[in-house]
Image (cartoon, rainbow, N blue to C red):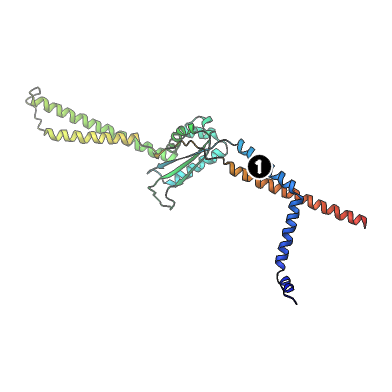
């Protein structure tokens, strides 16, 4: 047996592959106009779909809180996103204290941990990402998200209690400052001879001044804490990007191209099967 015949017998897979490639080329050649039409139609459909979609802008906000855990806030944000998907803009408008027509420009809200490893108390805060069709809505959306977090049932009760406590401390501190200020003025009047010389006030003036300074600092601290008493603190607000995040022209052209080729392949396959069936029926009829 010759070497050529040995090689022919030991490489049947190569023959099958060549035959498969030959059949594929014949199939493509016979149906080339179908595939070309599918490519053109698919690209046009992808372009039309891209043109019909609204421009989407993506921005994110970094929040922190010591009131509730990050996972609690993330679950709350998922509830908001579910309301957006179901078109419950009126319900969200009440939660966010925003006009309904502005919330219709918000397409998605998502929250996630900054630190991916779960901890019971994550000091790194969490990120809220928003997809909107108009950057102008981001300012009101940021305020609305903070307001909605504040109005959560558990957070709202704790905030009310905390604000009440701070208000009481402010009132007590203010009263103490007024008392110390009155004592200081009375002492000054005695020293300059305007007060009652029989008064038995014996107070160190420097001590009163130091106490007044301490009380003023406490008062300012309490007022500042009351001013920024929220369920969450905004570490970085939404940034308005000039360039949109979507839709992607290349993505929709690729999807259109793939869809066109799949449809063209199905049409060409059905056409080829139909031709074979007609040819077989014709041969049987002649026989």
Query: Can you give x and y, in whole percent of width and height, for residue 102 in the image?
Result: 51, 31
Q: Position of residue 88 (x, y in %)?
A: 55, 35
Identify which residue, 25 or 120, lies in the foreground: 25
Q: Is residue 278 left or right of residue 156?
A: right
Query: Percent from the top left, x then y, of residue 262?
Result: 69, 49
Residue 221 shown left or right of residue 5 in the figure: left
Q: Quadrant of residue 284?
A: bottom right
Residue depicted at 11% across the width and 24% down the height: 189
Give the percent coordinates (x, y) of residue 86: 57, 38
Query: Which quadrant does the N terminus fall into?
Result: bottom right
The residue where tag 1 is placed is 43
The residue at the far top in this view is 194
Q: Nearer the viewer, residue 214 or 128?
A: 128
Q: Please tell me whether residue 177 is drawn above or below residue 279 in the rendered image.
A: above
* Quarter of the image with the C terminus in it: bottom right
Label total for image? 1
Q: Nearer the viewer, residue 200 or 11?
A: 11
Q: Nearer the viewer, residue 216 or 6?
A: 6
Characterize the local packing of mark 1: few (<14), some (14-19) or many (20 or more) Cα atoms within 10 angstroms.
Answer: many
Q: Residue at x 18, y 29 (%)?
A: 181
Vertical order, 138 against 73 (above or below) = above
């Amino acid at each position: 047996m010759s070497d050529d015949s040995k090689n022919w017998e030991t490489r049947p897979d190569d023959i099958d592959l060549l035959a498969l490639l030959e059949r594929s080329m014949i199939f493509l050649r016979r149906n080339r106009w179908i595939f070309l039409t599918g490519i053109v139609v698919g690209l046009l459909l992808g372009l039309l779909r891209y043109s019909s979609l609204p421009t989407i802008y993506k921005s994110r906000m970094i929040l922190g809180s010591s009131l509730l855990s990050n996972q609690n806030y993330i679950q709350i944000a998922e509830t908001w996103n579910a309301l957006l998907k179901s078109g419950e803009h009126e319900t969200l408008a009440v939660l966010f204290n925003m006009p309904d027509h502005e919330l219709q420009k918000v397409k998605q809200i998502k929250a996630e941990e900054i630190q991916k490893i779960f901890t019971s108390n994550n000091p790194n805060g969490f990120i809220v990402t928003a997809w909107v069709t108009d950057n102008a809505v981001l300012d009101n959306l940021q305020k609305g998200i903070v307001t909605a977090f504040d109005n959560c049932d558990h957070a709202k009760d704790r905030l009310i209690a905390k604000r009440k406590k701070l208000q009481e401390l402010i009132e007590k501190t203010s009263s103490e400052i007024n008392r110390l200020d009155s004592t200081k003025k009375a002492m000054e009047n005695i020293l300059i001879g305007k007060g009652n010389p029989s008064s038995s006030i014996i107070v160190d003036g420097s001590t009163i001044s130091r106490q007044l300074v301490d009380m003023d600092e406490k008062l300012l601290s309490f007022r500042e804490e009351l001013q920024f008493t929220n369920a969450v603190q905004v570490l970085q607000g939404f940034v308005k990007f000039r360039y949109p995040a979507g839709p992607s022209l290349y993505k929709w052209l690729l999807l259109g191209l793939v869809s066109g080729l799949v449809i063209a392949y199905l049409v060409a396959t059905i056409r080829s099967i139909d031709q074979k069936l007609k040819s077989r029926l014709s041969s049987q009829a002649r026989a």
